[in-house]
Image (cartoon, coloured by chain):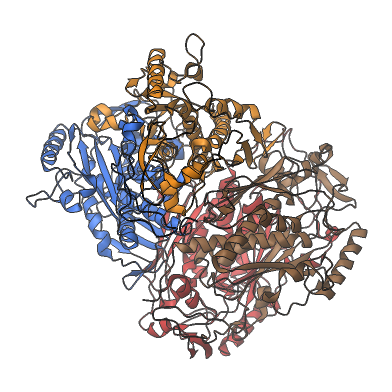
Chain colours: A red, B brown, C orange, D blue
Amino acid sequence: MSGSSIGRAFRVTTAGESHGPANVVIVDGCPPGIALSVEDLRADLQRRRPGQSRLVSQRQEEDEPEILSGVFEGRTTGTPIAVLVRNTDARSKDYDEIWELYRPGHADYTYDAKYGLRDPRGGGRSSARETVSRVAAGAIAKRVLAEAFGGRVTGYVKQIGDVVAHVEDPSAIDESRVERLPDGTPNLVRCPDPEAAARMVALVDAVRRDLDSIGGVAEVVATGVPAGLGEPVFDRLKADLGKALFSIPAVMGVETGSGFACATMRGSAHNDVFLPARQAPSAGQVPVLATETNRHGGMLGGISSGMPIVMRAAVKPTSSLARPQSSANVRGQAVTLRTKGRHDPCLLPRFVPVAEAMVALVLADHWLRWQGQRGHGRP
Amino acid sequence: MSGSSIGRAFRVTTAGESHGPANVVIVDGCPPGIALSVEDLRADLQRRRPGQSRLVSQRQEEDEPEILSGVFEGRTTGTPIAVLVRNTDARSKDYDEIWELYRPGHADYTYDAKYGLRDPRGGGRSSARETVSRVAAGAIAKRVLAEAFGGRVTGYVKQIGDVVAHVEDPSAIDESRVERLPDGTPNLVRCPDPEAAARMVALVDAVRRDLDSIGGVAEVVATGVPAGLGEPVFDRLKADLGKALFSIPAVMGVETGSGFACATMRGSAHNDVFLPARQAPSAGQVPVLATETNRHGGMLGGISSGMPIVMRAAVKPTSSLARPQSSANVRGQAVTLRTKGRHDPCLLPRFVPVAEAMVALVLADHWLRWQGQRGHGRP
Amino acid sequence: MSGSSIGRAFRVTTAGESHGPANVVIVDGCPPGIALSVEDLRADLQRRRPGQSRLVSQRQEEDEPEILSGVFEGRTTGTPIAVLVRNTDARSKDYDEIWELYRPGHADYTYDAKYGLRDPRGGGRSSARETVSRVAAGAIAKRVLAEAFGGRVTGYVKQIGDVVAHVEDPSAIDESRVERLPDGTPNLVRCPDPEAAARMVALVDAVRRDLDSIGGVAEVVATGVPAGLGEPVFDRLKADLGKALFSIPAVMGVETGSGFACATMRGSAHNDVFLPARQAPSAGQVPVLATETNRHGGMLGGISSGMPIVMRAAVKPTSSLARPQSSANVRGQAVTLRTKGRHDPCLLPRFVPVAEAMVALVLADHWLRWQGQRGHGRP
Amino acid sequence: MSGSSIGRAFRVTTAGESHGPANVVIVDGCPPGIALSVEDLRADLQRRRPGQSRLVSQRQEEDEPEILSGVFEGRTTGTPIAVLVRNTDARSKDYDEIWELYRPGHADYTYDAKYGLRDPRGGGRSSARETVSRVAAGAIAKRVLAEAFGGRVTGYVKQIGDVVAHVEDPSAIDESRVERLPDGTPNLVRCPDPEAAARMVALVDAVRRDLDSIGGVAEVVATGVPAGLGEPVFDRLKADLGKALFSIPAVMGVETGSGFACATMRGSAHNDVFLPARQAPSAGQVPVLATETNRHGGMLGGISSGMPIVMRAAVKPTSSLARPQSSANVRGQAVTLRTKGRHDPCLLPRFVPVAEAMVALVLADHWLRWQGQRGHGRP
């Protein structure tokens, strides 16, 4: 019950702390026969890795995954896939001081309140280090989506501070534009609008020099998803996607489609009109439809509509600051603290692969859940 | 797997369609010995009921609950509590036309895509009629919160269209201000700012006359919640609250605390400072702390901090419109349709008790989950 | 968490007490498009009904089911199916005495120990009255098995006291032999060996006259089940079948295939030899195999083998006796009690449809779970 | 959904194949503050280890566990505990032949039928190698039981072939008698009746010389368990214990208390009489009661009664035989095969720690589940 699993048909369970020996993830329910190698995991793990640029945490981790089970001769066998990632640069010699303190914006106090004790080294289980397991599992989910229906999940940075990217068509962004600038150099902030990207880099650099941090918004788009994924009522696809994104550290808000902008809209302007089908359905079959616009974010009644699925998450500025902050200690006394660890001045660039992973996990889960419930045409 | 259950320790399962014989909900896991009567359910069901004012759907339903099990001599027994609510005003004689059509913004098309068939009467399972079960379960959850730790959940309308309520302190709003205006008359839009409420009423009236609909934002606050509820990683309290709110029909976005506004903030301005404890903790105990501000929305690391829990949900304008709309039918052909049923020009007033119910369910669930995991002080 | 749900893909949740207003069951996950009517439920409910013969409890219940949701125009829609069965002959006027006492073999004491209180009327939730919900759900599961793969589940009484039925081939027994004797009269004990059935009837009559009760063994066979249902490790098909049968009141033991007799056997005598396939498999396909014998009970490695699935359950003698028994009361004092209620001198005849239902539920669940995990031939 | 998790509050998830790099288990939900070290795991792993005597498989595995997470300075933190056990003696060079064949009594055929492919090396996921993870998790569960209520779980061999141990009082057996003979030498068959143990050793030796195998029965007793663990209806304690034992490879039957012997008993002889309490309960409290006899096996209505919990499991003779057997291959053709691998002539001695682990897991799970549901005295 301690909440380290997600998904029902494609079930992901993680374990590991920031400064323990390793992080490990078990993916139970991956269908058999999917081509999968350690290379598939490595790519996304590198995108999430600390130390990849000056804009992110300088902790040095290889993040080299080892597949322990569930794969035989390059194909999944249908049995649980366990992936191990060792922690190598875990500097935890002097955590005595941290153990005494409750850092603002961190989980130190709430873990103590819940458990009566905590592993203080680098934030323990509450550290974003744990997302290494999510990204490994997400890479497996992406393989499932690709083989099952040609699905693809792409994330990018939409906003940092007051710099907002201009994105004409979210479903047209591909990973190359997220990872590289037009000149071929690395896109440090993973924003597909090159002009905004440059301003974001400048902003993050300025914030870093101020010993401060800054928030932002990421957008994730899933394309190629057929109509029919998701459940009525509680396990709506948007609900499970919402939960998945809210489960990432630092997320303060999640939107789909029109999002909070819907509050000021009228129904006549918000409804997305169904277009006539390009071809008539076979007898007893359901037509393949598209809508003219996509304010509904690719889901209606909690079930995918066949249009691109569009999600956004607001990410707060990093709570760890190199500047002094007031707080309280375990005896309830006032203290002043300054975070010494290595941290990201802006979480967004490394947030992107984590958000993609979470979206991919939910889609793989709902795809598999659907297989036992499928209808076979209208009566 | 078809998604009609929520919660793990306090588990709620619903069944029922808009125009079937009844809606029923089973709450499994309610602790024994909680005082509970049908009156406790009736109050919230009346707040959700259609026909309560000119601003909402004119469907006439008594929504009279019957407790079928789990209560003996006015106290819960620890066994499942089933509640039955009959549908009485289900006009479904002529649904043939609807069966042929895919209404914009509704789940007609996605249900067909998923299941190959659907119950077309009033939207079937996708209708918000199903939330009657959630409100009944939520009323039970509220009793649990009250008896377990004096917790209280209060929701209200924060925004309709461009009318935004001014709320000084969300945790100070109580139900009387939401249900009644200062002059004692019913607060038709459930907005605790009387001036904004008047403008919201005028706006909804205008929209209704235009045969249109309008969106908005509701805010839900939980007070009295001790620090310690929630889980690390996937079942973070904010993640489960996010899922619960996203599972309500028409929700397009969910926020906690600073929400999307965090994107433009710096860490030095966003972090909430812990105040010194009012009294030193006993030996080995964790101090009771508060923060100076509550941008974190009452949760840190996914676990409640003891500060008020603040959630917001953006609700789209009703998709059903009495004006003509373009769409497609089951053969993929272009059609024009006009919704004849009884519907709400603005969902927000009746959304409030549903949102409260979902927040209460999640809190009751996490409270119970915590009981087996509690620590007993710092070592 | 209070344990009133079973199944993951075909999920059954029950509520209701012996003497409350009603029992209700929600089946979530039934595939769409299955033909289902109230008649399908009625047949098995009649077989479970008290008052059907002099050998069973004389409580009078119509056990008339009402389908509240999930079925439209005679077909399942894929949404939850709720079934309501009212309790009509619940005589609970004078339960004060019972509330004070802990009956031997009953759950009075353990419920008090767990919950601190209990509904004493007729045993409350611990009464076998609750199995009415299981039988209703089982009837739905049987429809799924029949439509999905022509599967059939048949149970019968194998033993009462020291009378053991001779059954040449368990998979050849059909319901007509269980329900009727060769002369067309009702088979009161549901034993397909007529000679043993007659001796069982005489035994139960004798036991009843002695104000006593007697135990027995039921056997349940599932035929037509293809190879491939079940999971490795914890959710082995035999494990889930074992749990399902052990969840029925009064079951003290469960066997599959050779059962406890395997303890004295050698591997060379126990192994079931695979026979050559009747026809060669297509390229890349797995052959359809049978074994010469079926000591493995139709499951290998926890997965169905294609051979008939054979389960047995040992059922203790009814704990309620009309003769005086020593016990203790809620103050821990010695008392003598005599059960006045209406009870079965032998549980086996009415146990058969309940056991069938539990086996059917598990098979439907595993069938649906499998659909997302299927392989498509050997590489 | 692929079935590699068990438990709800104390949730265990395993991964790993016989000849892959490692087995790994994640225990999620272990309460914080429990003393736990790698030594606690090592003891039971050594009892399960192959190569420990001439009576068991000669595969050489160190089975050295590494705790990867969830423990800090010798105490559990409440976060998931991951344990890694490397496979070191995995000889899988020449599995091509095995891949072609379906061994009798093994899961080769059913895995192919389910998944379309399988990892043939040493049986892959279907190998009992996987139980190494269960034993590691069980050792953690035993620590929880000991700290929570002084509970203890002890298993032993009750029968091998026709040699049945005489055990006066199952609850009086402690591990020393299971592990050592009166003369201090190792008790190779883990039977606490020394005379029977000697005959069992002789029998297993004889069977081994015959290139054959033999079945048996193990008994597991849990003492110190308070009344109140378990749930009504589906998650009865006996149902979850039944499932847990049936989930172990080779189990063909499970009993509790009187077991199958109940079939021939009358209620007047089977009921266990409650004895008066040794001391009167405090006002509003439930008395602590015992029964004169324990035919009910320590559970009534699916909930623990406070008496010792007694379970038995029948284990089939090992399917792998060094003698030739007839079977079929992947093309459905008749073949003769002879198992070359290292296997146990009798599974019982190594089965004991696995059965203990499963019982301990279920008890820890139900203990934790109960904490949110506890009543606080009779009203």
- Looking at the image, residue C87 sits to the left or right of residue A75; the answer is right
Residue at 47 percent of width and 74 percent of height? A113
- Looking at the image, residue C268 sits to the left or right of residue A284; the answer is left
Q: Residue furthest left?
A: D183
| Res D70 visible | yes
| Res D52 visible | no
Say which quadrant the C terminus of chain B sits in: bottom left
Q: Position of residue B228 (x, y in %)?
A: 50, 70
Q: Is residue D1 above or below residue B176?
A: above
Q: Residue furthest top?
A: C183
Q: Is residue A213 above or below residue C210?
A: below
Location of residue B159 (image quadrant): bottom right
The residue nearer to you, when weighing D132 against B294, is B294
The residue nearer to you, when weighing A164 against C188, is C188
Q: Position of residue B92 (x, y in %)?
A: 81, 39
- Looking at the image, residue C133 sits to the left or right of residue D79; the answer is right
